[in-house]
Amino acid sequence: MPVDHGGQLTARGAATPAPPTAATAPSKAAKTEKAKIATAKAATAKALRARYDQATATLDPPLAIVDEGAFDRNAADLARRAAGRPIRIATKSLRCRFLIERALARPGYQGVMCYSLPEALWLYAMGTCDDLLVAYPTVDRQALWALAADAQARQHITIMVDSTAQLDVVDRALGEDHPEIRVCLELDVSWRPLARKPLVHIGTWRSPVHEPRQAAELAALIARRPGFRLVGVMGYEGQIAGLGDAPPGHPVRAQLIRFIQSRSVPELNQRRAEAIRLIEAITSLEFVNGGGTGSLESTAADTSVTELTAGSGLVGPTLFDAYTRFTPAPALLFALPVVRRPGPAIATLFAGGYVASGTGTPDRLPRPYLPAGLSLTGVEGAGEVQTPVRGAAAADLQPGDRVWLRHAKAGELAERFREYHVVHDDGQVTTVPTYRGEGQCFG
């Protein structure tokens, strides 16, 4: 069986592929432009690596940095995308008070969304914020006791509920005559294409409250329940906000995701608006929260929503590379030292097994970033005590050099480091504690 000039097998007797014509072959100008872009990218990567290496030259890796300029640019772009809606900061995506407070100080940002009640109590006590929404239901009795005992904190912290069973937990912990607790009702905003039945559920499994009628019924029960005040509604559209529409190397999956999102957005906006209309006929609301980094545009277009939430877009982890609507700059990086050279095109780094939570798929692994042209090995990946990297750039690495990597998820890197080194535009460095560095671990 003959082989054509491209190395593809062709059946005997089949027509030989026509050679490229002037109309189909890449033009010389296009090739030149592509080469210029590649050269510019390589120069930028080289300069960035030199900048980070120089700024942290007196520090020993493993270490983590925040590029302050990139963080600020990301914050400005999120505010632009929010189109005037205030952004509530998702603290789990930062887990560093310095970064939370820096974002809060910017125009367009208001309030925080915490991932646990103990975290909200701590941030309030530290003076970080006085508008704190807890994104997930709590069954932490000690935290509930602390909330009930602090009259000031109760005015500023709102807990999440999606059923009366969670109210029962609060009543059992505090007694039925407890002080008034602010609550937010979580609406399930996943997409159910089959007549809204759960047979096909596209999105995160969170609240059981899917239909506007269910939301109104729960709101009425909360309104009648002593010791609770319904002040808000929240919905996280994970199938839009947390699902990149351009997964690298998966064009068919990309088309499917875009189809899902194009159908989910109008259905959600209509259903959420109806739920809010029914709830506000029962009680007045202070806020309606929605969105995430990946859905700011579509959520901002929903007139029933009064505020948005974002966090990951501030630091640009690798999972947020797969979007066509925006491109956050990598603002959070970590460096590992080269400790071995086991082969001519491979270098071994110390530590590095900072694998992100979630599906357990390769996209949860950290990704080598600088120098450009490195990748993890398929056998070892990112290891507990060593991480081999391969590629042409590995040939120039020597023990003592450092490789910069990016984490897959935004906030989880803070669980690995007690401090972040903030690299300013002038090359100076300020070291700030993460939650871990302040002795805090909220799960």
Image (spheres, rainbow, N blue to C red):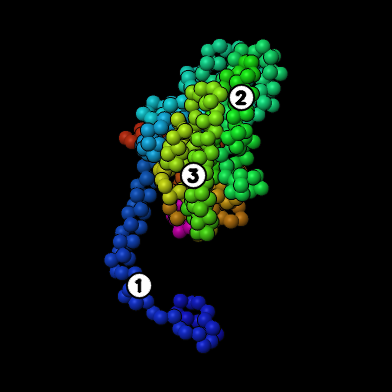
| Residue identifier under label 2 | 220
Task: State the image coordinates of residue 130 (x, y, percent, origin top left).
Answer: 48, 19
Q: Say if the magenta span includes residue 421.
A: no
In the displayed structure image, the side of residue 79 where residue 400 appears, left or right: right
**Quadrant in the picture for the N terminus:** bottom right
Q: Earlier in the sequence, mark 2 or mark 3?
A: 2
In the displayed structure image, the side of residue 114 where residue 165 appears, left or right: right
Task: Name which residue lies at 43% across and 26% down.
Answer: 110
Task: Name which residue lies at 55% across and 16% down.
Answer: 154
Kind of residue at disc 3:
Pro
Q: Kindly report which numbered mark, 1 or 3, lies closer to the viewer in this rendering.
A: 3
Determine contact: label 1, label 2, CB under 8 Å. no
Q: Secondary structure at mark 1?
A: loop
Task: Name which residue lies at 62% across and 40% down.
Answer: 205
Check the image and name the residue furthest to the right: 172
Give the alpha-carbon distance from disc 2 to disc 3, as whole Å. Answer: 27 Å
In the displayed structure image, the side of residue 85 where residue 415 appears, left or right: right
Task: State the image coordinates of residue 32 (x, y, percent, origin top left).
Answer: 30, 64
Kind of residue at disc 1:
Ala
- Residues packed near mark 3 inside 10 Å, few (<14), some (14 to 19) or many (20 plus): few
Q: What range is drawn magenta here?
A: 391-398
Q: Secondary structure at mark 2?
A: helix
- The answer to whether residue 375 is seen in the rendering is no
| Residue identifier under label 1 | 25
